[in-house]
Structure formats: C-alpha cells, structure tokens
Amino acid sequence: MNYSKEFFKIQIEFAEKIASITGKSIEGVLLEYTCLYKRFGIQNWSFNKNELVWQEFLKEFRISKNKTSTVYEFQIKHAENKSEKEVFFGCFRYEYSADEKDVRIHFSSHGESGSLGKANIEKRKEDLRLMCVDIKNKYPETKTISGISWLFNIDACKRIFPPRFTDNAKVLEWYRSLAIWGQFSDSKGNIRPETAEKFKICFLKQGNLSDLLSCFPYKVLAPSTKIENFYKFYETKKEVFDISPSKNTKEG
C-alpha cells in the first residue's frame, strides 16, 4: 500500500526538528527516526546507510525542492508488492525465525475484515486461532511468540490476546517502522489529521531529544510469551486446511 504525502511530511518535519536540536545530519536522522527505509521495498532490517536503494533515495532527496513529493514518489517507485508472498489471517500474519524458534506477529489493516472493534472480538480470536494452527502445522518446533507495535497499548488489541502475552510487554525505543509510525495512518494510508497535528504541535515546542521523543501518543510495546500459552488460549489443535495468500495494506 502507498502512503499519503501528509504521512511522509510529518516524518520529514519531525526529522528536521531532531536535526536542528541535535546537530545530527538529516540523512542520519531520516534513517534512525522515520519509517522511510522500510517503505522503499528494502528487504533487510539492517538499516544500512550504504544500502543501494537508500543511497539512491538520498541522492534525489538532497537536490529536491519538494522533499515530501520526492519521498512520496520514491515510495511509489520502489514499494514492493508482497501480496503473493504473504499469508494473512484476518489482519494478522507472522514471520518465523528458525534460529530463535520464535514467531513474530505482524498487523495489517483490511478494512472491516481487520477491525479490532468489540463487535469483531470473536472474529479476530478465530483469526489468531487459525494462525496458531498454521504455526503448529508448519513449525511444531516453535518455542515463543512475540510482537512489536504501538497497537499493544490499545485495549481493543489487548483483549484478543492471552494476558500472559500482553501483560509482559516491554517498552521499546524504536522509531524506524510502522510499529510506531502506524499510529498516524489510517487503514488506507491516509494521515490521521488530529493525531498528527497534536504530535506536530508538541514536537515543535521541544528543545531536547528526550522531550521530543515523548511527544508520540503511544510508545512501541514488545510482548512475548511461550507459544504454548497461545495454543491453550485459542484451544489450538492440529488441523489441515489451505490458506491462500491475501493482499495486505498496512503493517504495524
């Protein structure tokens, strides 16, 4: 999914403010404190400043007279279509780490099919149950399950997960992905104007980095628990079913 110009504009303004009060280069700040790197179809999570696509972006950004448009157009040019590669269970998908034997949950908006509203609690729990079945079938050696998102602050999100998962969430100082920037975007990639405006008013007034970073409405939370706690909570049994890849719109 492509995000709106306003979504990138607020990040550029945020980065410019950080650069002005810390003396850091705007290029370094964009890499460390915005989600731009991951919006350009870059597969890795190394945030390598020498990544070819990133360097291509910086070259255009340096000479641009309209920074927001440059970011927006670069996103359209380089955004990767993962719809054929990823399987979604409602608004959830997962990644498996063989080294850590850990499953990482990701969120993605699918309109009503991904709503976390009270009317959809049982639907979302069923999505997670089916996800657990898939994990149990494909990766029976899994030991733990984890997540990273601002959404774990929200009661509507917490009530669909096992308490042993969300109650142990740790605050993570992370500013490089939708895990934190997703709170300023709706399910269609448009900016949430009121949330973004309050955020902007706050960070423009700050004189040091710590106070500036405190302007985010929600911090990133990183819950984790044993996979068995998920299996018990959703009464997961080994089943056989076919899941076809579905299109994603927004991750968190």
Image (tube, helix red, strand yellow):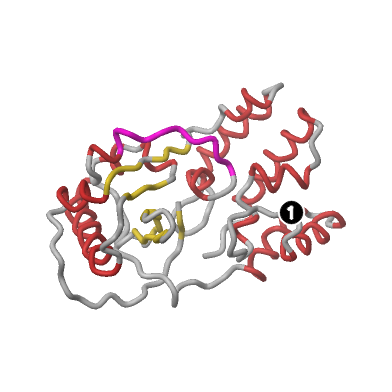
Q: Is residue 218 left or right of residue 209?
A: left
Determine the main secondary structure of the stretch shown in magenta.
loop
Q: Quadrant of residue 159?
A: top left
Asked if residue 92 is positioned above or below residue 225 in the image, the reply reads below
The residue that mark 1 highlights is 49
Residue 132 rendering spot, x and y as whole percentages: 24, 59
Give the amino acid type for the residue marked by disc 1 in the picture.
Lys
Residue 51 rendering spot, x and y as whole percentages: 72, 61
Write the start and end of the magenta stretch as one range: 166-175
Asked if residue 76 is positioned above or below residue 213 in the image, the reply reads below
Viewer-proximal residue, 66 or 162?
162
Q: Quadrant of residue 164?
A: top left
Viewer-proximal residue, 124 or 117?
124
Q: Is residue 232 left or right of residue 104?
A: left
Asked if residue 38 is positioned above or below residue 224 in the image, the reply reads below
Q: How many marks?
A: 1
Residue for point 51% across, 38% down: 194
The answer to whether residue 115 is magenta is no
